[in-house]
Image: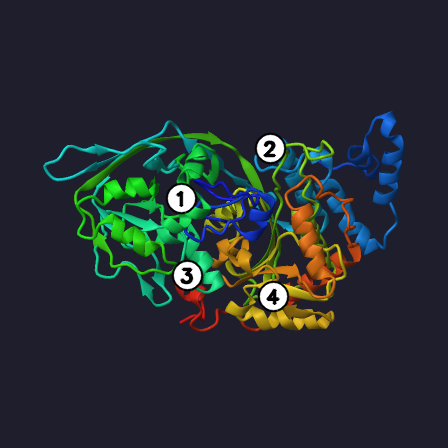
Amino acid sequence: MPATQILTICPIGQKHAQHGHTWRLTGIAALLGLKYCYDLQGIPMLRSTATLALLLCAASPALAQSTAERNALLTAPLPPEEAALKSHVMFLASDALKGREAGSPEFDIAANYVASQFYAAGLKPAGDEGGYLQKVPLISYKLDGIGAMAVQRAKSAPVALTAGKDFIASANPSQPEYSLTAPVVFVGYGIVGLGRDDYKGVDVKGKIVAYFGGAPSSLPGEEGAHFQNPAAKAEIARKRGAIGTITLESPLSAKTRPFATLAAYSTRARITWGNADGTGHIPAPGTPSLGMLSMAGAEKLFAGAKTPWATIAKAAAVDGATFKPFQLPGTITVAAKTAMTKLPSFNVAGMIEGSDPKLAGEVVVLSAHLDHIGTGQPDAKGDTINNGALDDAIGIASLIEEAKRFKTAAAKPRRSILFLAVTAEEKGLVGSDYFANNPTTKGTIVADVNLDMPIITYPFEDIVVYGANHSTLGPIVEKAAGEIGVKMSDDPLPGENIFVRSDHYNFVRKGVPSVFLWPGAGGPGRAAIDHFMKNHYHQPSDQIDQQPAINWRSGVRFVDVNYRIARAIADGDQRPQWNKGDFFGLTYEGPGAK
């Protein structure tokens, strides 16, 4: 799983944490100090078996005994289905691939490996130009210099704000050099939905909106996580005609993520994908994040306002506060430059065409991310390679084995099925976002089932299905789980807001009913999940011989339940629908929600 775009100092491989008074550097990230969050924009060769063993296990004579022991573990006989699953992880999580970081040569090797496996499974190429690979024009971008901000009052000299003390400018890949002057409207948290309208009564067309990051903790978990995402707030602002956004520090956010800490990370590079004109994509085109103001900077921005900053700040110290929006006096000028570097990568796509002429144009996507976080600082053993065996080589391996099941099944699926291995999930779900905006299939995508980091070090008794309660996919998943003797259970990590933190979410944002599956916390699951997250997640120890050992039988069962789910979706008489009145279905105008 992944981090984000601007002041993203959270780790989670760029798993989604964000600015805001709840800044919930989620439990995992807080515990591990890992990588992944949201920036202010709201923008992650075939070899023989013998050769592979050498790649995995080469060692000096001094380590011959331990190497022999490791070889014995790696090459221990398994039943065919388990061995097939393990073989993919042996390659993808080998040291030779150096952690499969998006944009690296090793990632490209991994992408070609998956393409070859899709070919061997009999999938039809569904990438660019008749191949399996979809070119993804990743761009690395960062602030060039410190930028500038100044507040202008009528008949008064401009008041220049101080970089690093009053403000942090945002890098803007959509306009590498810009200067913008406009009035500012304060809109509380910048949230519209769930009975709340922070824009009520104000006109923000052609203006800049300023709001607090995060979301009140009183909002439902998944919906609250959605509103914490800067991209969601920017989309709201864009729909109302705003031409930029500024995030304000609050007394609550200052306690968990002091402005000075964020400023220290403001020049770090982030990743997005490139538009055809060479600029970088932002979630709300035309409404970029312009930066963040500290409480000291906000006081200067609010000078002369009918409601003084001291009053606003006092109210914002209470979680869930509401504010009456209003326009501030004068204007603000923001200027910044952005340095950009191209970082090309690939998604991998293969298709099984549906057998029903009436339904074949409807496409069920089965997705998993191929990238991991590359190399880093040495651990206690001196290992620098983050192999990503469970995150997410096992998800890719499951995808390949599911494809084989579909191709050898007695009957073809009625709907078409797209098998999709995406890049740059660890950089902020970038590869799946690119695909969702630039699909290689001509059909209508009707569902996504996503596989990300299934922890299979134990015989799972239940499964967690993120998103099941939002659409008609829920009953389908529950039935499929029951067929292999497991039940659906509640989220074992409710504070992590995982529903909005993996690749399926980019399909949700296109109005597509989507789910993300994980083995559950029943029986030995709780201890196994906690152990992995503490001791292996985004660390070099997430490798094929980690302890507790990967349970390959559980891996086969996980493939089985995913196959049954995908099969049921593909063969159903009706395409998946959002539940009537569902927040995400309504927000993204998905079928069935109204």
Q: Which mark is residue 570?
A: 4
Q: Disc 3 versus disc 2: distance between alpha carbons?
A: 34 Å
Q: Position of residue 183 (x, y in %)?
A: 20, 44
Q: Determine the residue located farthest toward the left in the rendered image.
A: 155
Q: Nearer the viewer, mark 2 or mark 1?
A: 1
Which residue occupies 28% across, 53% down? 312
Query: Residue type at mark 4?
Result: Ala
Q: Is residue 105 above or below residue 87?
A: above
Q: Nearer the viewer, mark 3 or mark 4?
A: 3
Counting other residues with Cα less than 10 Å from the Cα at mark 2, is it few (<14), some (14-19), or many (20 or more)?
some
Query: Residue type at mark 3?
Result: Tyr
Q: How is the image coloured?
A: rainbow
**Residue 329 as seen in the image, left or right of residue 69:** left
Q: For numbered disc 4, what is the local secondary structure?
A: helix
Q: For numbered disc 1, what is the local secondary structure?
A: loop
Which residue occupies 29% across, 40% down? 297
Q: Is residue 536 above or below residue 176?
A: below
Q: For numbered disc 3, what is the local secondary structure?
A: loop
- Return the residue nearer the eye: 232 or 525: 525
User: Reading the chain from its start, which is encountered first: label 1 or label 3?
Assistant: 1
- Return the residue nearer the eye: 231 or 433: 231
Q: Nearer the viewer, mark 4 or mark 2?
A: 2
- Callouts 1 and 3 close, C-beta under 8 Å: no
Q: For numbered disc 2, what is the local secondary structure?
A: loop
Q: Which mark is residue 104?
A: 2
**Residue 276 as seen in the image, left or right of residue 300:** right
Q: Which mark is residue 40?
A: 1
Q: Is residue 529 above or below residue 138?
A: below
Residue carrying label 3: 588
Q: Disc 4 versus disc 2: distance between alpha carbons?
A: 35 Å
User: Reading the chain from its start, which is encountered first: label 2 or label 1?
Assistant: 1
User: Reading the chain from its start, which is encountered first: label 3 or label 4?
Assistant: 4
